[in-house]
Image (tube, rainbow, N blue to C red):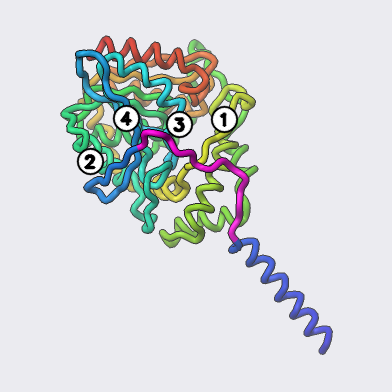
Amino acid sequence: MRLKRIILSLGLVSFLLIMAVFLWPRSYEVAAIQERTGTQFWQLKTGSRIAYYTIPASGEIQNSPIIYLHGGPGGLIKDEAIATLKPLAELGHSLYFYDQIGSGHSARLEDISAYSVQRHQADLLAIIDEIGAEKVILAAHSWGCLLAVNFLQDYPERVQSMILDGPGPILPIRHELAEQSPPDSLHLITPEFSNRDAIDKCYNWRARLILKYAHRFQSKLASDEEVDAFFTYLNQELSKSTFCNGSEAGHFPGGSGYYSHLMTIQSFNSVEDRRNLLGEVDLPILILRGQCDNQAWGFTKEYLKLFKNSRLEIINNAGHAILISQAEMYQEHVRRFLLQNN
């Protein structure tokens, strides 16, 4: 009888320990989000409270404003993006940088099922209306390119041109394109680290449970503070795959939005396939791809196939983070593109 009680007690202790692993909040030693002097806020008609930073155009000519769409989903505006694009204001373009809903300094949503491609698109349209622009130039990175293309399908009349840096796959994703090999003439290189390396290193049992719970119940199992800290920890490792050599990756800033990341990606499957509309678009598009970009070549090739007025530039000695590793080359190509298409 005593032995049975001991066994039951040990079983209870084991159960409680397991529950603690899954349910006890975790902390991560990562950078906290840093305030940026000059940050302002829009309260959009979509209900989103969006943080943004703007650089007014200089000079007499006032060309279409440039809106920068950061990567992710769930990423944020980095200082490097602002520093690299800032000189473009001299060409008469006002610059707008904003943290997408659920990330950076922008508000987090209680209902995480509201994070979706459609919500991000609606926010972008509301921002264009907010700044009073007839047409805008979209400068986008990674996931931001998916958002730009998705927006273009619905509102081609609001876009003057696009600069797509390290574009991810057009939605909905055609996974078979990832199997296509690039031509040898491009001299593309596989980066030292992969996203899988980071995922295997960073995901613990609690993080996996939070992910499954969010997808299954469309709800938060943990606070935004906890999951955003985890996402910063994960992004620190993921950033190694965005350079040719992982040692080039610096300290990753705090402020990423994990629930925005999870739920927006989940919404990818709900995006209607309207690739047929893109062939009708004749606006100029500059595509920049790093020599060591971790995005599959087949995805980049699809942009070139669909957009008849697109041009590809390969940036040597750069991975997915061109703005950081080859800022001057990025700036040179973009400046030339804008001067040719204003």
Q: Secondary structure at mark 3?
A: loop
Specify the amino acid type for callout 4. Thr
Question: Residue 177 location, x and y as percent?
Answer: 43, 31
Confirm whether the magenta stretch covers residue 38.
yes
Q: N-terminal of the two: label 2 or label 1?
A: 2
290 or 47, nearer to the observer = 47
Q: Which residue is mark 4?
A: 54
Specify the segment rendered in magenta.
Answer: 25-39
Label 2 close to label 3 by CB (< 8 Å) = no
For discs 4 and 1, the disc positioned in front in the rendered view: 4
As measured in the structure, the alpha-carbon distance from the residue carrying label 2 to the one carrying label 4 is 16 Å
Q: Secondary structure at mark 4?
A: strand
Specify the amino acid type for callout 1. Ser
Tag of residue 78: 3
Q: N-terminal of the two: label 3 or label 1?
A: 3
Q: N-terminal of the two: label 4 or label 1?
A: 4
Tag of residue 126: 2
As measured in the structure, the alpha-carbon distance from the residue carrying label 4 to the one carrying label 1 is 30 Å
Q: N-terminal of the two: label 2 or label 4?
A: 4
For discs 2 and 4, the disc positioned in front in the rendered view: 4
Label 2 close to label 4 by CB (< 8 Å) = no
